[in-house]
Amino acid sequence: MGLYNSISETMGQEATLFTKYCFTLVCFFDDILKDSKNARFYYEILEKDASRKERLYLIKTFNRSCLDFFNKSYEKDDLDAYAITNYGAQKEIYMDYYDRELPFDAHKVVEYLVRNTFRILAIDKETLDNTIEQAFRFSESGQLSEIRFLI
């Protein structure tokens, strides 16, 4: 949540909730994958399934907020099931990447994780592609360099 708040402050009021959430996910996963200590720490968290409830809560909260922002209707049970499957997908792809079982680079892993998160919103491909690309530029710009959110 701290990373999201920092991004919100940096981007200001004009940025949409969807944009802030997308940027948060890209920065979070990008920073984890670029730093070997963060990568190992995150792998151990996932391997032990530590903080599962907190991560599910965050996924549900952000998804509910985005669905509300886009005026999408949803059932609570659907949102709960989606949060669990999204959590599982994030965990498995990250662990497979870390174990070097995937044939693509970190950039592609981050892109997949973010894309999968937003499937529930049915956002058009062009909007999502543009936002993800902007988020990578933002992540690489160093504007959040003072944040050390894992180690």
Image (cartoon, rainbow, N blue to C red):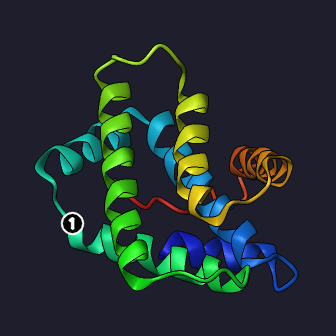
Q: Which residue is mark 1?
A: 51
Q: Is residue 91 above or below residue 24?
A: above
Residue kind at label 1, given as amino acid type: Ser
Q: Is residue 68 left or right of residue 74?
A: right
Compared with residue 100, is residue 64 higher up or lower down, i.e. above or below? below
Q: Is residue 42 left or right of residue 59?
A: left
Q: Residues within 10 Å of mark 1 (few under 14, many from 20)?
A: few
- State how many labels appear: 1
Question: Residue furthest toward the left?
Answer: 48
**Could you say where residue 128 lies in the image, as x and y percent from the top left?**
76, 52
**Where residue 130 appears, x then y in whole percent?**
84, 48
Report which quarter residue 69 is drawn in: bottom right
x 40%, y 55%: residue: 86
Q: Which residue is at the front of the view, 80 or 29?
A: 80
Q: Residue at x 34, y 17 (%)?
A: 100
Residue drawn at the location 31% of the way across and 62% of the way down = 84
Which residue is depicted at the point 11% across and 49% down? 48
Vertically, is 138 above or below 44?
A: below
Q: Nearer the viewer, residue 44 or 21?
A: 21
Above or below for 136 versus 104? below
- Across and down, in percent, residue 85 comes to 35, 55
Image side of residue 55 versus residue 102, left or right: left
Viewer-side residue, 127 vs 5: 127
Percent coordinates x, y for residue 57 in the rendering = 34, 77
Q: Secondary structure at mark 1?
A: loop
